[in-house]
Image (cartoon, rainbow, N blue to C red):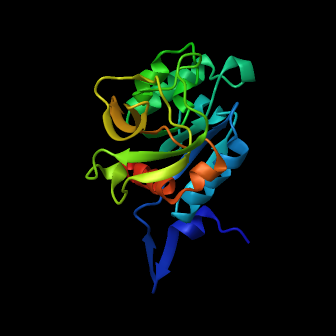
């Protein structure tokens, strides 16, 4: 029997109810032209195992509600007209306001390329992939280097090898705080950064293309660290 979010997030000690400090209600926006049928269930399981209530939405209809009922947003998605899942104008405006007003955002892999005709998306995420411009070497093994081991998102993470895509040619904002990178043709390629958009905290992890990529222990540690970071 699957445990409910209430059972996961609450425990009884004697006659006293103790609510776990880490409990969050998280909206995972998924769907698009990527293997999200592999990766999004992995994210959901990871978040639930860490005591959160994770809800997956491919429609993103939750963004149509002016009374947003989640603590933070995880984007594991590629929204565009070509796949009939681009955000509507109302969803774009509400998404922007939700983050600007203080909700945290975790953006994964190609998610910043969503809504390609809406430049505000990468202003929110601090940058990322640009459809038709960014590129990567063939999917395979490469080493990820941690720039700042004292950054909250890279806490407990050392340099590691992963089986993934090393993104290149990203459109990045000047004031991002980069905490990890890859190297392609002798050049540093940022792969993880934090940023602030209004009152909202942003974490962007450019890794995570496949199920195997997202099952990597260091990727999962990056995700759990990111959730803690953007929720504070």
Residue sitting nearer the eye, 221 or 105: 221
Q: Report the side of 181 relative to 39 (left or right).
A: left
Residue 232 in sight in this render? no
Residue sitting nearer the eye, 92 or 159: 159
Please give the name of the residue rendered at 58% of the width and 32% of the height, measured from the top-left corner. 63
Q: Position of residue 131 (x, y in %)?
A: 58, 19
Q: Position of residue 178 (x, y in %)?
A: 33, 37
Residue at the outermost bottom position: 14
Residue at the outermost top position: 117
Q: Position of residue 34 (x, y in %)?
A: 68, 35
Q: Report the side of 31 relative to 218 (left or right).
A: right
Q: Position of residue 61 (x, y in %)?
A: 66, 33
- Counting labels gives 0
The part of the image, by quadrant, that contains residue 4 is bottom right
The part of the image, by quadrant, that contains residue 5 is bottom right
Q: Report the side of 218 relative to 181 (left or right).
A: right
Residue 216 in sight in this render? yes
């Amino acid at each position: 029997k699957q445990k409910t979010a209430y059972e996961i997030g609450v425990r009884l000690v004697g006659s006293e109810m103790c609510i776990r400090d880490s409990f969050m209600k998280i909206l995972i926006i998924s769907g698009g032209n990527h293997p999200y049928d592999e990766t999004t269930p992995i994210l959901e399981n990871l978040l639930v195992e860490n005591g959160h209530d994770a809800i997956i939405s491919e429609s993103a209809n939750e963004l149509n509600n002016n009374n947003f009922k989640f603590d933070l947003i995880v984007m594991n998605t590629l929204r565009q007209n070509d796949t009939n899942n681009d955000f509507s104008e109302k969803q774009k405006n509400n998404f922007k306001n939700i983050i600007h007003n203080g909700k945290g955002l975790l953006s994964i892999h190609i998610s910043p390329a969503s809504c390609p005709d809406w430049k505000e998306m990468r202003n929110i995420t601090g940058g990322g992939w640009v459809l038709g411009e960014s590129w990567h070497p063939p999917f395979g093994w490469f080493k990820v280097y941690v720039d700042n081991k004292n950054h909250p998102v890279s806490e407990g993470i050392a340099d590691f090898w992963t089986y993934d895509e090393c993104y290149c040619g990203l459109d990045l904002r000047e004031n991002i705080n980069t905490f990890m990178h890859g190297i392609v043709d002798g050049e540093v390629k940022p792969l993880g950064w934090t940023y602030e958009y209004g009152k909202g905290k942003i974490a962007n992890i450019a890794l995570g293309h496949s199920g195997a990529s997202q099952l990597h222990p260091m990727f999962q540690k990056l995700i759990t660290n990111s959730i803690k970071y953007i929720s504070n």
